[in-house]
Amino acid sequence: MKPTTEIVTVSVDDREKQKMMIDRVAEQYGTEIDYVLLADPDHRVIDRYGLFNPSEPRGRPVPHPTTYVIDMEGVVRWKMTEVDYKIRPENGDILNALRELY
């Protein structure tokens, strides 16, 4: 059986705000988002991971940007959390973590 990879995002935005973002991406970049968007407006899941950032400088509480690579047994194999929302992991870093799973 060939391994699969799935991208899932979680944000504090409700479905309406997520729809606005999806439409903006489609208009601005001419592409559709092809991954799962989960809404957590009460930040219950985000809080469970300790990622909520109530003092976000843009005046809008959001979680710290975090990327996980989780194996098929649910074990976190790689993680990057950044306080600065502008800093995200490089695609190569994520790909390397995924390659180590297989």
Image (spheres, rainbow, N blue to C red):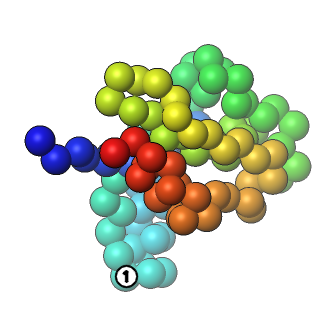
Please rate how many residues cluster around mark 1, counting C-alpha atoms within 10 Å: few if below 14, some from 14 to 19, many from 20: few
Above or below: residue 70 compared with residue 83: above
Above or below: residue 8 compared with residue 32: above
- Return the residue at label 1: 30
Front position in the image: 60 or 65? 65
Q: Going by the image, does 72 lie left or right of 90?
A: left
Where is residue 3 shown, x and y percent of the image? 23, 45
Q: Going by the image, does 102 lie left or right of 76?
A: left
Front position in the image: 41 or 66? 66
Name the quadrant of the N terminus.
top left
Where is residue 65 shown, x and y percent of the image? 67, 46
Above or below: residue 71 compared with residue 34: above
Residue sitting at x 49%, y 40%: 69
Where is residue 99 shown, x and y percent of the image? 41, 52
Residue sitting at x 74%, y 60%: 87
The answer to whether residue 50 shows anywhere in this view is: yes
Q: Amino acid at mark 1?
A: Gly
Residue sitting at x 39%, y 33%: 71
The answer to whether residue 39 shows anywhere in this view is: no
Element class at badge 1 = loop
Residue sitting at x 57%, y 19%: 44
